[in-house]
Image: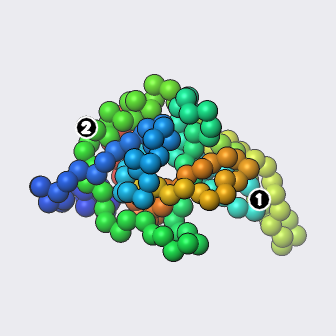
Amino acid sequence: MLWALLLLFQPPNAPRTPLATVCEVLRNPSAYKNKPVAVVGRFERSVSLMDSYEYMSQDRCGTGRATRILIATDRDDGSAPPKDRPNLDPSGLAAKLAEVRKTTALGTHKEPRFKMVDNRITFSEFVDVPNEWAVVYGRLAKIPEPGQDEVRYAILVASANIQRLTEDGALRPSN
């Protein structure tokens, strides 16, 4: 909620934050590299028993490679996300989400569940968890050595700059 309120109180002449879909960023990463940008797409998680990762994704980008951008809140090389808050254009945000929705369904991802057995935490099952629409504001960085999933770019963000969206592209109130 605080994030949404801060957006309302941006100075009237503050420049709008550049908006891009995941596909736009992946088609022309040099245009966004190391520059603040708000990326609109499907927010999804990859969760295993050992660790988890968050991504912004979009289907059918036509890039011939992964259509996901890793969301990173810290980096070993000392690079940092923007500290400011984005000044998002609500109609531009809705238009970008409408563009993403032409090629991308929300879908689900699997997450593990655990239970206590004899005072030990043990794996119980995997459950399907719905993905969400989101906008993340950060700085695009190339991943030096892509992992097994072939993701080549990360967006460096402050955790407060990950905002879920409603079906029509409006900012969802924060919990």
Residue 90 as seen in the image, left or right of residue 139: left
State how far apart marks 1 and 2 are (Cα): 40 Å
Mark 1 residue type = Leu
- Quick check: 93 above or below 103? below
Label 1's element? loop
How packed is label 2: few (under 14 Cα within 10 Å), some, or many (20 or more)?
Answer: few
Identify the residue at image location x=50%, y=58%: 141
- Quick check: 158 above or below 29? below
- Quick check: 79 above or below 171? below
Pointer 2 residue: 91
Identify the residue at image location x=38%, y=30%: 98
How packed is label 1: few (under 14 Cα within 10 Å), some, or many (20 or more)?
Answer: few
Q: Residue furthest right?
A: 118
Mark 2 residue type = Ser
Label 2's element? helix
Pointer 1 residue: 49
Can residue 42 be seen in the rendering of this structure? no
Identify the residue at image location x=43%, y=65%: 81
Q: Residue 78, how many percent across, how many down?
A: 51, 74
Identify the residue at image location x=83%, y=62%: 122
